[in-house]
Image: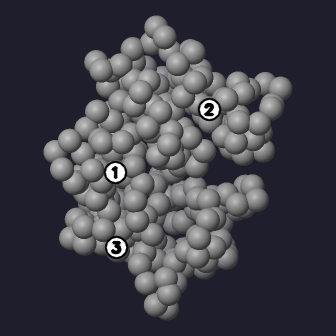
Amino acid sequence: MNKLFRAKIIKNEQLTKDIYLLCVESPDEIQSKPGQFCLLKLNQRLDPLLSRPFSIFDHVSGEIKFLYRVKGKGTRILSTFKKDDYITLSGPFGRWYPFPQGDFIVIAGGIGLASVYYLMKRFPKRAYLFYGVREEREILFYDELREITKEMYISTEMECPYTYKGIVTELVKEKCKNLSLPIYACGPMVMLKELKKVVKESQVCYVATEERMACGVGACLGCVIETKEGFKRVCTDGPVFDIRELLL
């Protein structure tokens, strides 16, 4: 069930120079699943006109969390919201990650953690997490991730004493030679393209894609992505797709 509602902000915490965690009150009737997203209205005026999609980072009774990076006008406005302000949301929207039947692999590229954290928390101690960031200070929720994952591997592009130096897909190739578990991934498009080269043809791999959109219900066609079967809508056909379906 998705609906439009106004939510009171519990906190809007700055975690790094440009990454924030927004926590809002959630009506009891709102139900969500890992991989889904909400549209957030960032301004009561006309600029920006469109709401922005944000992955549901976590959802517990009475509270929804969104992890976001400030990189444009909309997210800069969002970063100015304070505790006890109100924000307008609609959702949850989109297809969720098919639930894993056993252990599984998760690949999070940077802020892509926003899409997969909820899945790992829903199925604790079953995920082998591969988490790639640019530098040490961008590693988020280290203790929480250690608590909910089965094993965790971190890669950084810059030198760090306790991480693998390189891109996260190289780390996956090194550690997963004998692991044929289903993969769940979210990250920048360049990471998804590299991941498609790594995944075996027989291996299940679900990825969450990100596109701007206007409506969230498939009417505006503003968020289409190219697949083997033609263009599909990220908002309703996705955002979760089988990676073999996508033309990356």
Q: Nearer the viewer, mark 2 or mark 3?
A: 2
- As helix, strand or loop, the secondary structure at mark 1 comes to loop
What numbered label is drawn on residue 214? 3
Q: CA distance from mark 2 to mark 3?
A: 33 Å
Q: Which residue is mark 1?
A: 239
Q: Is residue 3 visible?
A: no
Q: Nearer the viewer, mark 2 or mark 1?
A: 2
What numbered label is drawn on residue 167? 2
Residue 14 found in image quarter: bottom right
Residue 137 in the figure: left or right of residue 235: right
Q: Residue at x 33, y 45 (%)?
A: 240
Q: CA distance from mark 1 to mark 3?
A: 14 Å
Residue 234 position, x and y percent, is 31, 55
Residue 163 in the figure: left or right of residue 198: right
Q: Residue at x 54, y 28 (%)?
A: 169
For the residues bearing labels 2 and 1, Cβ distance under 8 angstroms: no
Determine crowd level at label 2: few under 14, some 14-19, many 20+ residues with C-alpha closer than 10 A: many
Determine crowd level at label 1: few under 14, some 14-19, many 20+ residues with C-alpha closer than 10 A: many
Inspect the image, locate mark 2, and give the three-letter code of the amino acid beneath it.
Answer: Ile
Residue 68 found in image quarter: bottom right
- 194 is higher (above) or lower (below) than 34: above
Q: Residue at x 28, y 18 (%)?
A: 202
Which residue reaches farthest top?
Answer: 178
Q: Residue at x 76, y 59 (%)?
A: 17
Q: Earlier in the sequence, mark 2 or mark 1?
A: 2
Looking at the rendered image, the quarter that the N terminus falls into is bottom left
Q: Earlier in the sequence, mark 2 or mark 3?
A: 2
- As helix, strand or loop, the secondary structure at mark 3 comes to loop
- 71 is higher (above) or lower (below) than 123: below
* Depth order, front residue of 94/247: 247
Inspect the image, locate mark 1, and give the three-letter code of the amino acid beneath it.
Answer: Pro
